[in-house]
Image (cartoon, rainbow, N blue to C red):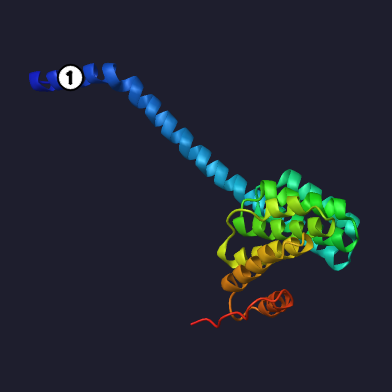
Amino acid sequence: MAYDHEEQEQLATLKAWWNQYGNLITWLLIIGLAAYAGWTGWNYYQRSQTAQAGQLYEELQKAVVAKDNSKIQRATTDMTAKFGSTPYAQMAALAAAKAAFDANDLKTAKAQLQWVVDNGKSDEYKAIAKIRLAGILLDEKAYDEGLKLLAGEFPAQFAGLAADRKGDILVAQSKIEDARAAYKTALDKIDEKNPARQLIQLKLDALGGEPAKAAA
């Protein structure tokens, strides 16, 4: 096929441009396609992981209903090892901690709760684990460890419960003024409709605290 002079100049320009930038563009396309393939593969992997974790969690729930603590702990070990990045692993560890606590296996209960504190992806699940673990530490008279767990910020819906647990530890340490302040903070942060308020108010009253003010 014959080309006129103008077309030949355009082809020459195109060839020169491709010689200069062609490899770069090719590599950019390859990188882009690889990134897309990786992103698609990762999403598939995540969906697959979540689905498998969900199935294992269903088995764990059956063990919970049967109160089979040994099976619960085994299933949770598998869950945290294989699917630790999924929400199911955090829920499993919390369930396993309760089962161990009910079986008076405090060492395992603490280990499961600590796993959530250290590895949990959800601030809410981590808050639950910290409050429950602080309760065990209170029973073990490990007061400083418990207070350390309760330091820092908590999600709004758990801030009052964390302050309440802090008050319990401070009472055990005979730090009455600090405990009274913690219980007042708990009342300020817990919703008026939350039944936990009544118990916290009783604790505060027992310390000689002032009645909680009604919300405006």
Q: Residue at x 50, y 38 (%)?
A: 37
Residue 130, relative to residue 8: is it above or below? below
Q: Is residue 59 visible?
A: no
Q: Residue at x 56, y 42 (%)?
A: 41
Q: Residue at x 83, y 60 (%)?
A: 139
Residue 148, relative to residue 139: is it above or below? above
Location of residue 91 in the rendering, given as x and y in whole percent from the top left corner: 71, 58
Location of residue 44 in the rendering, given as x and y in whole percent from the top left corner: 58, 47
Location of mark 1 (residue):
13
Q: Is residue 66 visible?
A: yes
Q: Residue at x 44, y 35 (%)?
A: 33
Q: Judge by depth and name the residue closer to the eye, 125 or 61.
A: 125
Q: Secondary structure at mark 1?
A: helix
Q: Judge by depth and name the residue closer to the eye, 18 or 63.
A: 63
The quarter of the displayed image where residue 63 is located: bottom right
Location of residue 208 in the rendering, given as x and y in whole percent from the top left corner: 70, 76
Q: Judge by depth and name the residue closer to the eye, 109 or 185.
A: 185
The quarter in which the N terminus is drawn is top left
Location of residue 15 in the rendering, given as x and y in whole percent from the top left corner: 23, 18
- Position of 112 compared to 148: left or right? right
The type of residue carrying mark 1 is: Thr
Q: Judge by depth and name the residue closer to the eye, 159 or 107.
A: 159
Residue 121, relative to residue 14: is it above or below? below
Query: Dot 1: within a 10 Å radius of its alpha carbon, few (fewer than 14), some, or many (20 or more) residues?
Result: few
Q: Residue furthest left?
A: 5
